[in-house]
Amino acid sequence: MNKKQTKNTRGKIIAAAWKLFYDNGYENTTVDSIIAEAKTSKGSFYHYFKGKDALLNTLAYLFDEKYEELMEVMDDKMGSYEKLLYLNRELFAMIENSISVDLLARLLSSQLITRGEKSLLDRNRLYYRLLSRIIMEGQENGELRADLTVGEIVKAYAICERSFLYDWCISGGEYSLRSYSQRLLPVFLADFRKNY
């Protein structure tokens, strides 16, 4: 199996699982229903995942797929600050519309207790590479502060996004994640702009 087929098969399983988790709830989704939705085999499923619980850690993969889509349509003429706000707005809209609060809470709690891979902190993710590129461009063009490292700004941005997600979960999704973030993220990011 070549690398592209591997990514496609794994990606189809992940997409099917999260669709079913959203539609039917985590507890009501079975491995067999995921296999049927993904149109794959049981052998393929177990080649990539030990079981349904292993799929909880793949939400970061879906986020990165969304970032890939956004990279293709993002206006290159936007400044770095606007790109960060755009990425946040679009990702949070996707989360709000297709990931249940309960599932997101499960992911966040699994990241707290896992001893193994913490997918949200994986620096090899597209998320971190994209943020680093945008912030580096912002520093090079004088839009963002250069007295802090790219890594420091990336980490602060990621912490800020995770805090929004965490609060949205513990609030039971009682407000619009996207709207709230779009109103307050600029406040958190203001200090990273060079003109402040």
Image: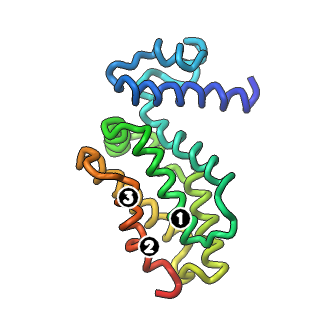
At which x and y percent is residue 91? 49, 51
Badge 3 density bin: few <14, some 14–19, many ≥20, Cα 10 Å: few
Which residue type carries mark 1?
Answer: Leu
Q: Which numbered circle lies on residue 191?
A: none
Residue placed under numbered mark 2 in the picture: 189
Which residue type carries mark 2?
Answer: Leu
User: Disc 3, disc 1: CB below 8 Å?
Assistant: no
Residue at the farthest right position: 2
Q: Element type at marker 2?
A: helix
For the residues marked 3 and 2, what is the alpha-carbon distance in whole angstroms? 16 Å
Q: Element type at marker 3?
A: helix
Q: Element type at marker 1?
A: helix
The answer to whether 65 is drawn above or below residue 149 in the figure is above
Name the residue: 50% across, 70% down. 153
Question: Which one is nearer the viewer's eye here, 155 or 103?
Answer: 103
At which x and y percent is residue 57? 45, 36
Q: Quadrant of residue 101?
A: top left
For the residues marked 3 and 1, what is the alpha-carbon distance in whole angstroms? 15 Å
Q: Quadrant of residue 185?
A: bottom left
Which residue type carries mark 3?
Answer: Ser
Residue placed under numbered mark 1 in the picture: 84
